[in-house]
Image (cartoon, grey):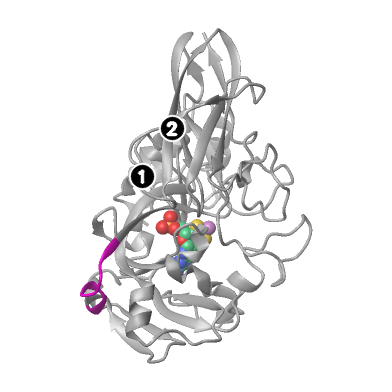
Amino acid sequence: MTSQPASLSRRRLLVGSAGAMVSVSLLGMVPLARADEPKTLPDFVKWKDQSALIVHSANTMETQRGAIGSGVVTPSTHLFVRNNLPAPDGITDNPDAWEVTIEGVASPKTFTVADLKKMNVTSVASVLQCSGNGRAFFTHGPGGTQWATGAAGCVVWTGVPLSDVIKELGGNSEDARYITATGGETLPAGLDPKTLMVERSVPVQALDQVLLAWEMNDQALPLSHGGPLRFVVPGYFGVNNVKYVKNISFTKDQTDAKIQASGYRLRDVGVKGAPDQPSMWEMPVKSWITAPLEGAKTGRNMIYGVALGGVNDLEKIEVSVDGGKNWKQARFLGPDLGPFAWRPFVLGTDLPAGEHLIVSRATDVEGNTQPPERTPNERGYGNASWQDHGVTVSVS
Ligand SMILES: Nc1nc2c(c(=O)[nH]1)N[C@H]1C(S)=C(S)[C@@H](COP(=O)(O)O)O[C@H]1N2
Ligand SMILES: [Mo]
């Protein structure tokens, strides 16, 4: 493994620092890939900016809270990565040749990416956010990647609206209630494919916004983000945005793949996932502070953050520097790239010396607003609590 030397030198670096105890215990027979060991970027994402990322595992990396910046669009080098399975090898070498089959329509057909590129090309900005973003704040210890704020980013997708493709195929079947998209992973042999495959169903109403995308941030879609072709559902949680999509089907029922049937289901702590529980589809309104994060000087300070409305436009963003007792309306920054994009915001305010709990609370045009508290749920999904996303800043 190419990461071995770097990983070893990192350990040496830790000896004699605060991490000394950890590193000493790592010397010897402990396997390289320990969950608590700082890791270098795996090969398929070597092009990313490691200083902007927290590497949780070879398939999970999150953006550092302070690395989001105040731009509307997240640079691809800073964007989080989350793969349930390793990304397939070599499929982005000739992206135009990638094929996607569309079924559950009047005339089913297989398109290459080259075919799709001749259609009505559109760009949409949308927030990509993992269902487990904010999981680290739950106190019941839900399993899975301990994402804080960084399993989210706002990017610009370019592709063809699925609705255009469907029109060309004579429309979808009348009894279709879901659009089911299948990822192009090669599944390990000998195991039940249903337990591993990334196949997600979303309500057919999402057809209004689904894009088949081959570009992200004006570059060919990288393998790590689903190239050559991705099924993008703006406003929906990350898992519904199926990478390397190879099949799209209009179906009467949701897929019985595990990732849909029992995975990504909202339920009480201790309860098993089941198809009758809410699926992680539309994202709720949410925001968080991105600066300052630790220390600040007394006097005038600029407080920055990002806010998203999920499927709705935002109405307002408020900031409190006293833990939610008093709120002030902050200002959105930059252009509004539409309901699915996030909006950076800023508030200029005077901060006296002392510790301040800075929190933010977004409200969408339908009056939906962030709750003060998270709702405990088995897997730690959908955390939009404004209290959890606050930061304690010490001002001196
Ligand atoms: N084919 C496929 N699509 C996938 C996944 C996957 O493992 N395979 N992971 C999903 C999950 S859980 C999330 S949060 C997003 C992450 O997108 P990103 O890695 O581009 O940030 O992709 C989704 N689409
Ligand atoms: Mo996810």
Residue 288 pos. (x, y %): 53, 36
Question: Mark 1: which secondary structure?
Answer: loop
Residue 298 pos. (x, y %): 49, 8
> Mark 2 and mark 1: span between their CA atoms?
14 Å
Q: Tell me which label, 2 or 1, sits earlier in the chain.
A: 1
Tell me if I can see residue 19 in this picture: no
Residue 54 pos. (x, y %): 46, 42
Q: Amino acid at mark 1?
A: Thr
Query: Which picture quadrant has residue 168?
Result: bottom left
Q: Is residue 11 above or below residue 254?
A: above
Which region is colored magenta? 115-122
Callout 1 environment at 10 Å: few (<14), some (14 to 19), or many (20+)? many
Residue at the extreme bottom of the image, as rendered: 107
Q: Residue at x 59, y 35 (%)?
A: 389
Look at the image and say whether residue 61 sits in the magenta stretch. no
Callout 2 environment at 10 Å: few (<14), some (14 to 19), or many (20+)? many
User: Horizontal placement of 197 versus 342: left or right?
Assistant: right
User: Horizontal placement of 163 versus 114: left or right?
Assistant: right
In this view of the protein, which residue sits in the foreground, 140 or 127?
A: 127
Query: Which picture quadrant has residue 49?
Result: top left
Residue 26 pos. (x, y %): 54, 42
Q: Is residue 370 above or below residue 329?
A: below
Q: Which residue is mark 2?
A: 345
Marking on residue 74: 1
